Amino acid sequence: MSAVTFPPGFLWGAATAALQIEGAAMADGRGPSQWDTFCAQHPECIHERATPAIACDHYHRWSEDVAWMARLGHNAYRCSISWSRLLPEGTGPLNEPGVRFYAQLFAALRAARITPLVTLYHWDLPQPLADAGGWENPATLAAFVEYAKTCHTLYGHHVTDWVTINEAAWTTLQGYVTGLHPPNRRSDYRAAMQVATHFLIAHARVAAALHARQPEARVGMAMNLSPVYPTTDNDNDRQAAAIADGFFNRWFLEPLLLGRFPADVVALLEKHGLQPTIPAADRVLLAAPSLDFAGVNYYYPHHVSAAADATEYHLNTSGRRDEACKFAIAGLFRFVANPRGRYTEWAWEVHPEGLTELCCRIHDLAPTLPIYVTENGIGRQEELIDGTVDDTERIEFVRAHLVALHRAIAAGANVRGYFMWSLLDNFSWINGFKKRYGFLFVDRQTQNRYAKRSAWWFRDVIRHNGFINTL
Ligand code: BG6
């Protein structure tokens, strides 16, 4: 038995994203985002043809949800602002009901002593900007900076911690390589590298703009990071793993933490004529680290083999354990299943040690940089029985990841908070609503919320700022 105690002032809470919980998609002047359009135009791409139109109806139930957070002892909450609710055109006039919605939400969080950590972009690009070329178009970056400044003007008195972009790597990958998310482009590697780099530029510009307005504002990014392991010790597999690590992790970690791009990835892009365009002024911005904190979204690791004859992409959206996720780029690398691994119903490997490694890796690159786990959690198929859900599997998942996180802290990583994904069972993108992630079970018919066992367990963890590890 050992005490797993976290540093004083540790932030404990859950994470959500606007599109996944708010609903009220057409209400009070909100404009459509690329996800509303995609779900409406391609229902066959979403499990059971679900849409985010109602989601968890958080737009109307936000005060109940804040009350739940308070009841569950949370002292922090990561959420996102819907750009389309604030600025329906992406630029131009403000939508007053949207302005009021977030003002009320942030004020209520502060009143409940819950620190908001606010994401500016969690994939829901306003449709007019998507129509004009989305994140490939430099005009979107300019619009994003204006939107960020607007958010700061409106809410800077309540919000000090800003996450510019959620999972630049994942949204680029699914939008431009697998084509599973909007804008649904497949194997467009040129666009992917440009967009991934535009996200870095957008982040750096917003960080500079917010710091110029308020030096004590803290600006970070939520990065989807995964340890990448070669499947064997042979040189080919090791090299393939290094390339995958370069694209998925280092393309983001190195500019953000060290102010440089990874030389091996740059050389590979040059070899294939895929270098992104970076304006001179942005090169200067990117040459300096630009994070006040690193946000780590961690779900699972990658195991990589060099044996990649064919390009192949598939994500398990059904929750059937035998439906494997596939990702391979011919001639570069293939992700393979770990024969010794434990997997969730959606075929995501459960590997808590990865969280220790990622936080220690950030600590090695930037020793004092504060780190928040901005997402970590497990999707399950769940049923409400006697008003609750016995989600022991989630408790074990979170407990194991907190033990792993504590190891990173003991090794010197400056970890300051943990946000479980998610507060509510929500719209899980192409998985629809079958994949449940919440501390709170949401009844899809009534929208009533019910605390799962994990919610009460987590409340006790927060009360003690840790727990006794009996394993
Ligand atoms: C992250 C996203 O990729 O993982 C969340 O930031 C998302 O928005 C979460 O919901 C889990 O992924 P999924 O696809 O299972 O919902």
Image (cartoon, rainbow, N blue to C red):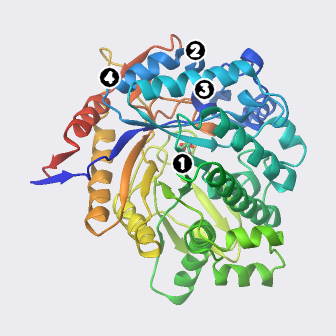
Quarter of the image holding residue 233? bottom left
Q: CA distance from mark 4 to mark 2?
A: 19 Å
Dot placed on the residue nearer the N-terminal end, 1 or 2: 2
Going by the numbered disc 2, the residue's amino acid type is: His
Tags 3 and 4 touching, CB below 8 Å:
no
User: For mark 3, what is the residue?
Assistant: 102
Among all residues in the image, which is located at the extreme top? 446
User: For mark 2, what is the residue?
Assistant: 60
Residue placed at 85% from the left, 56% from the top?
Answer: 138
User: How far across and down, in percent of the image, does residue 28 sit?
Assistant: 73, 15
In this view, 92 is above or below 416: above
Q: CA distance from mark 2 to mark 3?
A: 12 Å
Q: Secondary structure at mark 4?
A: helix
Q: Is mark 4 within 8 Å of ligand 1?
A: no
Point out the frontmost of discs 1 and 2: 2
Q: Secondary structure at mark 1?
A: loop
Quarter of the image holding residue 341? bottom left
Point out the frontmost of discs 3 and 4: 3
Point out the frontmost of discs 2 and 3: 3
Q: CA distance from mark 3 to mark 1?
A: 39 Å
Q: CA distance from mark 4 to mark 1?
A: 38 Å
In this view, 425 is above or below 237: above
Among all residues in the image, which is located at the extreme left? 1
User: How far across and down, in percent of the image, does residue 359 sit?
Assistant: 40, 64
Dot placed on the residue nearer the N-terminal end, 3 or 4: 4
Going by the numbered disc 1, the residue's amino acid type is: Glu
Dot placed on the residue nearer the N-terminal end, 3 or 1: 3
